Image (cartoon, helix red, strand yellow):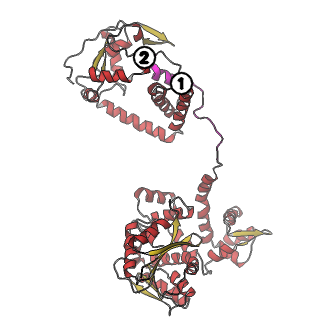
């Protein structure tokens, strides 16, 4: 496209005007147009063939007698926008004359200057600068207002459906733009403006905005919900419910009630709490099934006796202590940071096992291992009952931690010996538990690195809560290493919480998956399908998925003989 080197002479159009609601419009239908009648009802009924013809035959077209130029091709439009020297709003032209037909050219300077200040009409780089400011404000408004594009779209489509036909521009895209902007800047959105003559369609935007500004109609219609929202409320109140259990644990509420049933007043005095605060703790713990009340006396339920007392063999107290020590791991800020960075936050991005190998982290390792033991003892006493291990001789408990699962397996199957294969500080803790249960003859420890050291000889490899610490590639490495190390006929057992095959539940596993996001780089929970596929890929056969205890399951396979 050739640039215009000198101003195009404009003259005020002689076309007649008409008034509507106090506004003045030019009526192109009252004059004879030379080639393209761009204001006729036929054009607005089907403009596309005409626009295509203009693009092919008259890509730069002067519409007389308006002195309006139509530029039809994309590249030509870009040329104009990028050339404010020859194409500028500061140069008086036909648009100004069209708006003020009786004004002399000398009277247009102030008008043109004011128009040039508008973002829509301004030249670059001023246009770019103003648009960025407006966009920032507009998007900020959009973010903090209750504003729904979907409601506007639904309403427009309903109107179109009632009409039985539509014009994409007039009936949808143009009103959508106007309604969205008006809603975002807090103007009330009313009904569509009455139909204007086709030759006045360019006034739709202005009339739509004026209608929205004066309408008293509500933005959204109220409809009775189809659900009661209890799932949302459960999520909201759960944010306060579950940490309250940690407070009750730290205040020693559960061992206090284990001594003898007590009244609210007696509990308040023993814990040095106000009665209202004591009632808050008791209500939460009773609602969760940890405390029961009879004749105004509170006591522990069976589940609390088994899992919330340090004296219980299946105590969760170590796990609760670990959660209190890492409270940021279940805070809003902690979860948000881990999600946004896709990185663990508990150990500041380092591998959980690299941390435990450091000499100055012995106490961290001990706390972690005892916490894992408290969560492992109960399922460790159950899963060995789901398999026939009478033909196995030696269990290798890989990254076996406290040895809870070796303990459970050897207590059930007297024919089994077990070796806990883990880091030195972890093995020290495991030896304490082995001695506590009198199993030194059946269970031993072996210091080693599962990534770099060879596995000791065994015909049964066991991994509990190991695969969920890593991504699939690392788990594939461990699976292949076990397959190569096992004797023919040997078995592998993966002990995990499992997602369903579509990873849409259960909720407990989804919650554990959040924990792994926060604790371990690459950590995640898997479905039984994902883990069984992993076993099959390296050559295991006779693969089974077995639910065992609560949320726990095992995925097991056998190396062909």
Does the magenta-highlighted stretch encompass residue 206? yes
Q: As rendered, which of 58 and 410 lies closer to the eye? A: 58
Q: Height in image: 217 above or below 492?
A: above
Quarter in which the C terminus is drawn = bottom left
Q: Nearer the viewer, mark 2 or mark 1?
A: 2
Q: Looking at the image, how many numbered discs can be counted on the residues?
A: 2
Q: Secondary structure at mark 2?
A: helix
Residue that appears at 41% across and 62% down: 343
Magenta residue span: 198-226
Name which of mark 2 and mark 1 comes first in the sequence: 2
Residue lying at 45% horizontally and 73% vertically, measured from the top left: 466
Q: Pointer 2: what residue?
A: 42
Left or right of 283, for residue 478: left
Task: State whether residue 193 appears in this view.
Answer: yes
Picture coordinates of residue 353, whole percent (x, y): 40, 74
Residue at x 49% of width, y 17% of height: 196
Residue 334 x/y as whole percent: 47, 60
- Crowd rating for badge 2 (residues with CA inside 10 Å; few <14, some 14–19, many 20+): few
As drawn, is 255 to the left or to the right of 168? right
Quarter of the N terminus within the rendering: top left
Visible in this render: residue 450? no
Quadrant in which residue 86 is drawn: top left
Q: Is residue 143 magenta?
A: no
Mark 1 secondary-structure assignment: loop
Task: From the top left corner, tell me how far across and down residue 308 is, in percent.
Answer: 62, 74
Residue designated by label 1:
192
């Amino acid at each position: 496209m050739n640039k215009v080197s000198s101003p195009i002479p404009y003259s005020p159009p002689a076309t007649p005007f008409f008034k509507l609601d106090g506004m003045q419009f030019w009526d192109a239908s009252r004059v004879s147009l030379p080639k393209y009648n761009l204001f006729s009802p036929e054009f607005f009924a089907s403009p596309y063939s005409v626009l295509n013809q203009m693009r092919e035959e008259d890509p730069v077209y002067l519409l007389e007698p308006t002195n309006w130029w139509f530029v039809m091709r994309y590249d030509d439009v870009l040329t104009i926008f990028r050339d404010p020297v020859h194409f500028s709003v500061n140069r008086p032209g036909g648009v100004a004359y069209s708006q003020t037909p009786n004004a002399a050219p000398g009277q247009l300077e102030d008008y043109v200057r004011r128009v040039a200040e508008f973002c829509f009409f301004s030249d670059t780089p001023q246009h770019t600068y103003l648009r960025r400011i407006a966009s920032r404000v507009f998007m900020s408004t959009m973010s903090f207002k209750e504003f729904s594009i979907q409601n506007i779209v639904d309403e427009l489509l309903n109107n179109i459906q009632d009409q039985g036909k539509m014009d994409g521009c007039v009936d949808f895209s143009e009103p959508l733009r106007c309604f969205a902007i008006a809603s975002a800047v807090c103007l009330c959105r009313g009904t569509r403006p009455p139909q204007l003559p086709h030759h006045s369609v360019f006034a739709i935007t202005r009339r739509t905005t004026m209608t929205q500004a004066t309408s008293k109609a509500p933005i959204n219609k109220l409809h009775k919900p189809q659900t009661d929202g209890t799932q949302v409320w459960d999520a909201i109140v759960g944010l306060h419910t579950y940490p309250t259990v940690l407070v009750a644990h730290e205040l020693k509420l559960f061992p206090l009630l284990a001594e003898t049933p007590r009244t609210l007043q007696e509990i308040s005095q023993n814990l040095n709490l106000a009665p209202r605060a004591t009632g808050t703790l008791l209500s939460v713990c009773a609602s969760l099934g940890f405390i029961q009340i009879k004749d105004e006396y509170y006591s522990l339920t069976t589940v609390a006796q088994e899992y919330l007392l340090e004296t219980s063999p299946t105590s969760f107290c170590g796990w609760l202590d670990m959660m209190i020590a890492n409270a940021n791991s279940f805070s809003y800020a902690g979860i948000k940071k881990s999600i946004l960075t896709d990185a663990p936050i508990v150990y500041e991005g380092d591998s959980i096992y690299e941390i435990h190998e450091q000499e100055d982290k012995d106490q961290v390792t001990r706390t972690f291992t005892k916490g894992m033991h408290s969560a492992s003892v109960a399922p460790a006493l159950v899963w060995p009952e789901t398999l026939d291990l009478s033909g196995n001789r030696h269990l290798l408990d890989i990254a076996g931690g406290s040895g809870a699962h070796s303990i459970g397996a050897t207590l059930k199957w007297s024919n089994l010996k077990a070796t806990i294969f883990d880091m030195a500080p972890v093995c020290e803790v495991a030896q304490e538990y082995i001695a506590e249960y009198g199993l030194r003859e059946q269970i031993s420890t072996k210091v080693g690195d599962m990534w770099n050291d060879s596995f000791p000889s065994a015909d049964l490899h066991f991994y509990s809560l190991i695969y969920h610490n890593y991504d699939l590639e690392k788990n594939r490495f461990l699976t292949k290493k076990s397959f190569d190390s096992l004797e023919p006929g040997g078995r592998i057992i993966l002990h995990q919480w499992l997602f369903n095959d579509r990873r849409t539940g259960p909720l407990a596993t989804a919650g554990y998956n959040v924990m792994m996001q926060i604790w371990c780089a690459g950590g995640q929970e898997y479905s039984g399908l994902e883990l069984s596929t992993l076993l099959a890929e390296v050559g295991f056969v006779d693969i089974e998925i077995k639910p065992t205890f609560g949320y726990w399951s095992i995925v097991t396979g056998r190396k062909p003989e």
